[in-house]
Image: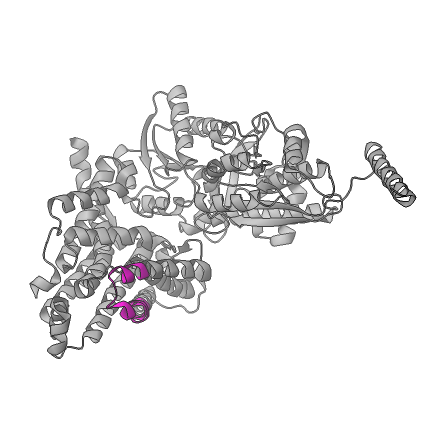
Amino acid sequence: MGKPRIFALVAMASVGLAACGSSTTGTAPSKPDKVQIAAEGPFTGDEASIGAGALRGIRLAVKDFNNSGGVHGTQVTLVPWDDQHNSQTATTFQAQGISDPTILGIVGPMNSSQVLATEPGLQSASPPLPFVTESASAIKVTEGGYTVAHRVNARDDKQAALDGQFMIDKGAKKIAILDSGTDYSRPLADAVETYLKAHASTIQTKRDVATNGQTNFTTVVTNMKAFGADWVFFADEGSETASLVQQMKQAQLNIGANINFLGTDGEDDSSIITKSQGAYLGAYASNVTADPLSVSTAASFVAGYKAEYGANSISDAGPFYGSAYAATQVLLQAIANAPVNNGKISRKDVLSHLGSDTFNTILGPIKYDSKGDVTNVTIGIFQAQGTIAAPTMVAVKSLSG
Amino acid sequence: MDYFLQNFPQQLVNGLEAGSLYALIALGYTLVYGILEMLNFAHGDVFMVGGFLGAGVAVLFVHNGVASIPPALIVALMVLAAMGGSGLLGVGIERIAYRPLRNANRLAPLITAIGVSLLLESVVQVQISPAPVLVPSNSLTPQIVFQVGNIATPFMGATLFVAAILLMVGLDLFVFRTRFGSAMRATAQDREAATFMGIDVDRVIVVTFLIGSALAGVGGILFGLRFSTVNFFMGYLLGIKAFTAAVIGGIGNLRGAMVGGLLLGVLESMGGGFISSQYQDTFAFLALILVLLVRPQGLFGQPLTDRA
């Protein structure tokens, strides 16, 4: 080995030591080469009305984050995965994401069915691919022991208690409990039925199924009428609701007059008023996330959303535009907190920071428990009001804790 | 027992309404099978396209307020657009996708039909709307409910049933009482002999596709006005059920398709109402299995050919 080579090695070692020294003394971390996150949900298809608004929220969060400097100066690229509420499509995207190490996390999937279909694969990837869902509320999502699972919304057990107690407080006597047969819908309907039996044994219930994708509900409505229901509880992602309530009206079951209706988060959607040609007016729907309009820390987000998408954009934003923004904030902050090594950020480090850090979001600070659940989250019940031309969902009850 | 007696009439009405739609679509399957002995699995999607064509006209005139046209005229335009568009689509599919395979292995047109079905769904999903489209039925049809005792049915439910029956009877008369109907039956019986007798077989086949597809188009309109929505995947399950109805009735037999459709609707409604709504779709296929086990040729047993 000649002298020039020895000098070169000494010089490289000096640079290396200098680099180590700088990282321990708090100077700016190095810039990652490329940072990508995916957004997964039903952005088209039968549940586009909830997915499209969420995607707008995610896009805005990425834009705001990039405007404030991105990840140590690197702009984040958003990759939308439109699973169309289809588990097979979701699995295809999952494989694509796992094979690309620059995709550091997923905002979504939105539907519990798609989360449950993909989380084993996301967990077994090397390194695992973490996700932060803005809306998947099935209890099983965070009970399967998958460390990749995180959500910013409440779970079904909390929602079921709110829903059940709401109907009890409103004096319900006979409740037709419907589910749509999905991984999200059925456990939630079960949980509400269990809550009602435990807390109001005099209330009669009757279970029925309004299958996902079905359009003709005349048989179910006839069953409802024969039972003499004064309340309908329908755990659904929202795509069947407009047809169901219209057919209830045609069978002379008028919401707010001779029957009441309580839906769940997918039905906290003012577009159902338009799609049902007004039959949904007066109906209630619970949501597993807070309404950004009633959260003081989300005021600037709401203003930004209107500025970005139009003054009337909130009315068709769906129920998850705020939680989608918050979920994106969580994932991006975890990525920004992860170390950069040789221009790369590891998913393993992102996952570690998701588990340990506290995140500032428009819906308040978020810190995860060991399962990936948020302990302190506000949920609420909303009512369909306004007109067919100007529909709106108005908050009537909220529950924090 | 009281529960059953009290609700049986309403579930029967529900079943007849659903069944009349199955029957209307089943006619297209059975007509084509009767003439060509091929299963046109794209037929359910022709029904879907008819629904979208009608919805397009409705949206144009109602939502966009192009002109203050009487609702009845808008509905008439919807029917014209759906019948014409679906009819021409059916003819086009036959000309492009099926005719070149007329003498091929029987599997070839079957696979092609599935391909055409997927193509139609994809085109509508990508080019028109991936989300369900609202059909403004409240602005187009009377919002009245017919009530007799405990039985209630909305105007469009009754209209669906009556329109389907009239169309089915009209088709039956056309096939069995007209000169062209005789040509259709002759073609169904023996295509080669019909050619020797001077029948333009290609023309018969084209008209068969035109009629079957136009009926599916009307079905699409009736579906849209009854349920106030159309979507790109609506032809899939309804198409399979209509095909099941045709097989139950005896595929190739027009009257069998009608009865099969109505029977299927009633079975589903009764099963969903008195056994479990969770298995409502299953009853159709359970009925199919039972009928095929007991009477493999279907309830009416004779194909169109034997009735000529």
> Is most of the magenta stretch helix, strand or loop?
helix
Q: Nearer the viewer, residue B299 or A399?
A: B299
User: Residue drawn 24% across and 50% down?
Assistant: B18
Q: Is residue B195 above or below residue A97?
A: below
Counting from the top left corner in percent of width and height, residue A100 is at: 60, 46
Residue A136 seen from this side = no
Q: Is residue A357 above or below residue B238?
A: above
User: Residue drawn 35% across and 59% down?
Assistant: B115
B5 lies left or right of B99: left
Q: Nearer the viewer, residue A291 or A356?
A: A356
Q: Is residue A260 above or below residue B223?
A: above
Instruction: Kindly give the residue lying farthest to the front in the view shown.
Output: A1
Counting from the top left corner in percent of width and height, residue B128 is at: 44, 61
Counting from the top left corner in percent of width and height, residue A99 is at: 57, 44
Q: Nearer the viewer, residue A123 or A293?
A: A123
Residue B68 sits inside the magenta stretch: no
Q: Which residues are magenta?
A: B85-112
